[in-house]
Image (cartoon, grey):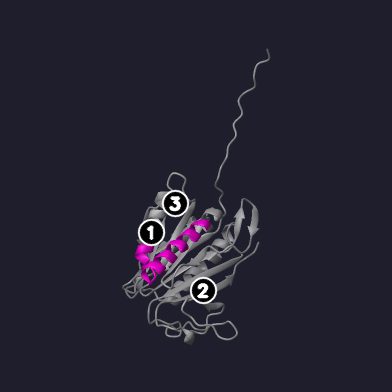
């Protein structure tokens, strides 16, 4: 009888790494959440426009990165939970409660987790900007800034240096991280993704930057109303006859959400 061959092993991996990078920075009365739009697998680009940042409410924006299929499904479930809350309570869920809800949703799937890293940014009930970062099984904390994704090892040290002043001595009049002006934060975000695109093949194509402003704050009041590629996505904005919305069209004087779209390198 001929000897049997060595047993063969068959592996199945339900997850995939789809590249891309996300980050968020919290200010005194604003939050900035950004992500690139490239979706890839290995050396193949699957699409050049796959958004990683999603508006949940006028106070909260969620960025997801990792396995794209899990990320899209998780965002869908989070929006569904928020819709149920809105119908039951006739108001939007507060940011801190959204962070806790996301934690319980991730932890409930810990034995077959969503392979996504989440960053939640927005405005707290006291009007301050906040950022919450999550790992795939629900561990989370509130921070002033956080990056995640393929280029995290490139972007996070830069944020630590520019936001937390790590490895440098700030001048006496340097603003505390939570008091950095919005214009300065936007330049840090743009520089972060421009640099990451130069050094990492899984980052590029496009950049979406979401701005969440506290109640009573406007871009014109901050001197930023002339930014190119800016559009408002606040849910309480009334559209003009041509389908566009201008800053004076807001029905109530609540929080404001804007998105800035930029081009990144496509090679």
Give x and y (percent) for residue 253: 40, 82
- Per the rendering, the mark at residue 136 is 3
- Image quadrant for the N terminus? top right
User: How would you rate the neighbour count of disc 3 (Cα within 10 Å): few for under 14, some for 14-19, many for 20 or more?
Assistant: some
> Which residue in the protein does label 1 denote?
101
- Tell me which corner region of the image, top left, top right, bottom left or bottom right, holds residue 263: bottom right
What residue is rendered at 51% in x and 68% in y? 191
N-term mark: 1 or 3: 1
Mark positioned earlier in the residue sequence (1 or 2): 1
* Image side of residue 198 versus residue 224, left or right: right
Quadrant of the snapshot with the C terminus: bottom right
Magenta span contains residue 119 = no
User: The residue tagged with tag 3: helix, strand or loop?
Assistant: loop
- Which residue sits at x=61%, y=29%? 8
What range is drawn magenta here?
73-101
Q: Position of residue 133 (x, y in %)?
A: 41, 59
Label 1 and label 2: CA atoms lie apart by 25 Å
């Amino acid at each position: 009888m001929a000897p049997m061959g060595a047993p063969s092993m068959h592996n199945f991996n339900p997850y995939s790494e789809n590249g891309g990078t996300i980050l968020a920075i919290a200010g005194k009365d604003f939050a900035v959440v950004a992500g690139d739009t490239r979706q890839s697998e290995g050396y193949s680009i699957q699409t050049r426009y796959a958004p990683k940042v999603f508006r949940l409410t006028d106070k909260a924006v969620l960025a997801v990165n990792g396995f794209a299929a899990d990320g899209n499904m998780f965002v869908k479930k989070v929006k569904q939970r928020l819709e149920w809350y809105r119908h039951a309570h006739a108001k939007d869920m507060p940011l801190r409660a959204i962070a806790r809800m996301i934690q319980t949703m991730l932890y409930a799937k810990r034995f077959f987790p969503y392979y996504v890293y989440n960053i939640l940014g927005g405005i707290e009930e006291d009007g301050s900007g906040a950022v919450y970062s999550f790992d795939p099984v629900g561990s989370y904390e509130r921070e002033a800034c956080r990056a995640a994704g393929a280029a995290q090892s490139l972007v996070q040290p830069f944020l630590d240096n520019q936001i937390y002043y790590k490895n440098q001595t700030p001048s006496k009049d340097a603003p505390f991280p939570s008091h950095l002006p919005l214009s300065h934060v936007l330049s840090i975000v743009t520089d972060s993704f421009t640099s990451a695109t130069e050094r990492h093949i899984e980052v590029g194509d496009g950049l979406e930057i979401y701005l969440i402003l506290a109640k009573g704050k406007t871009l014109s009041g901050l001197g930023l109303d002339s930014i190119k590629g800016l559009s408002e996505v606040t849910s309480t904005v009334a559209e003009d006859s041509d389908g566009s919305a201008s800053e004076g069209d807001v029905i109530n004087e609540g929080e404001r959400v804007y998105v800035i779209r930029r081009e990144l390198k496509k090679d």
